[in-house]
Image (spheres, helix red, strand yellow):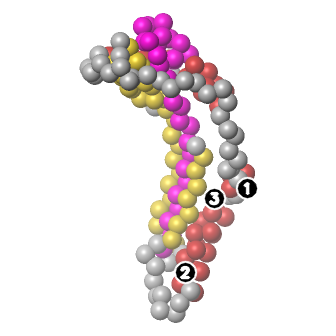
Amino acid sequence: MQSQLSQLAFEVVQKSQRLGADMSEAFIINAKELSIEVREAEIENLKLAEERGLGFRVFKDGRMGFAYTADLQPEALEQVIQEALANSQQTSVDPGNLLPSPVEQYPQIEIFDPQIRAAEVEAKIEMAREVERVGRQYDPRIKITESAGYEDGEY
């Protein structure tokens, strides 16, 4: 999936330059998020969300334009290019409107724990309940908690 999204971004940049952009860049987001909130050991809120979209920035004649879409279909990608180009015409000319020089290779940051992805949602709910239990056991004066939670995400 990641290589398909990278290819989409590449195609949008290439097409924008064929349509007259001096420079352009695309930002793809493909994120998943889980949020669990418990109170009195009962689930108060459980949110499982997924976000996918493309942010697009163009530079034309010293002006910058930006547009975003959550729809990655070809028609929507064509529209996001047109919107960014149109938006650039509404901004002031600034000679500093340039993209930085490309980096040959970005560092690989190993901050992902595959065990988190493999854990079932029920186990994550139990972690939130355990946080609440431990908090209550910390001091006998603690009678109630507002809530306890668990969150994770992939970006």
Q: Earlier in the sequence, mark 2 or mark 3?
A: 3
Looking at the image, residue 48 lies above or below residue 16: below
Compute the Cα span from label 1 to label 2. Answer: 25 Å
Q: Residues within 10 Å of mark 2 (few under 14, many from 20)?
A: some
Quadrant placement of the N terminus: top right
Left or right of 9 on screen, residue 147: left
Is 14 inside the magenta-drawn segment?
yes
Left or right of 17 on screen, residue 154: right
What residue is pinned by disc 3? 121
Residue type at the position of mark 2 = Gly
Residue at horizontal 46 percent and vertical 72 percent from the top:
147
Disc 3 element: helix
Left or right of 49 on screen, residue 120: right
Disc 2 element: helix
Q: Earlier in the sequence, mark 1 or mark 2?
A: 1
Check if mark 3's residue and mark 1's residue have beta carbons within 8 Å: no
Compute the Cα span from label 3 to label 1. Answer: 12 Å
Percent coordinates x, y for residue 40 in the rendering: 50, 78
Q: Start and end of the magenta stretch? A: 11-39
Disc 1 element: helix
Q: Residues within 10 Å of mark 3 (few under 14, many from 20)?
A: some
- How many numbered discs sit on the rendered protein? 3
Residue at horizontal 58 percent and vertical 24 percent from the top:
102
Residue type at the position of mark 3 = Val
Residue at horizontal 58 percent and vertical 74 percent from the top:
131
What residue is pinned by disc 2? 135
Question: Which marked residue is nearer to the observer: mark 3 or mark 1?
Answer: 1
Compute the Cα span from label 2 to label 3. Answer: 21 Å
Percent coordinates x, y for residue 108 in the rendering: 69, 40
What residue is pinned by disc 1? 115
| Residue 75 in view, yes or no | no
Question: Which marked residue is nearer to the observer: mark 2 or mark 3?
Answer: 2
